[in-house]
Amino acid sequence: MTEDDAIEEIRQQKIEELRDRTGGADGESTAESAPEEPVPVHGAAELNDVVGNHDVVLADFYADWCGPCQMLEPVVDSIAAETAATVVKVDVDANQRLASEYGVRGVPTLVLFADGEPAERLVGMQDEAQLRTTVENYA
């Protein structure tokens, strides 16, 4: 078994554990339905509210001046519109403390929350198909 195979096996086990804790794919969920557009977040309290009220949240830490962030924006919009994940946008210039709390050192950084906990971190420009697969593994 290669290291990649071992990592994938662990990831699948964690996904199953999350599904078991949240009632599984067919179980009832008390979480709110996901909005179809990214939601701007201004501070830790707001992010915590969103993460607490939704099963899967994709946080896009970005900056207006960042070229890769601008290129990633349509991908993030598509994920918000076409998946069960709630997408939030966090401007790192306006929310420096929040970005620091999540260890954001470069933009764009995407943090995927599942069951209220950070589950994945992706830094830099992302391929839409890969990002969609990552999100759907937790949704």
Image (cartoon, rainbow, N blue to C red):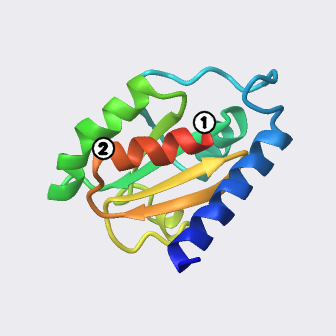
Q: Identify the residue shown where x is 54% and y is 50%.
A: 43
What's the residue type where badge 1 is placed? Ala
Q: Identify the residue shown where x is 57% and y is 44%.
A: 137
| 64 w.r.t. 1: above or below | above
Residue highlighted by disc 1 = 139
What's the residue type where badge 2 is placed? Glu
Horizontally, residue 90 falls left or right of residue 77, namely right
Q: CA distance from mark 1 to mark 2?
A: 16 Å
Q: Identify the residue shown where x is 59% and y is 77%.
A: 1
Are the residues at dot 1 and dot 2 in contact (C-beta closer than 8 Å)? no
**x and y, in percent, of residue 84 in the image:** 54, 28
Q: Identify the residue shown where x is 55% and y is 59%.
A: 120
| 68 w.r.t. 23: above or below | below
Sequence order check, earlier mark of 1 and 2: 2
Horizontally, residue 87 falls left or right of residue 54, namely left
Horizontally, residue 105 falls left or right of residue 55, namely left
Q: What SS does tag 1 mark?
A: loop
Q: From this viewpoint, which residue is outermost toward the front?
A: 1
Looking at the image, which is closer to me, 30 or 14?
14
Quarter of the image containing the C terminus? Answer: top right
Horizontally, residue 58 falls left or right of residue 76, namely right
**x and y, in percent, of residue 94 in the image:** 38, 55
Q: Which quadrant would residue 24 be assigned to in this image?
A: top right
Q: Which quadrant would residue 117 be assigned to in this image?
A: bottom right
**x and y, in percent, of residue 13 in the image:** 73, 57
Specify the label residue 128 is tagged with. Answer: 2
Looking at the image, which is closer to me, 122 or 63?
122
Specify the label residue 63 is tagged with. Answer: none
Looking at the image, which is closer to me, 12 or 94?
12
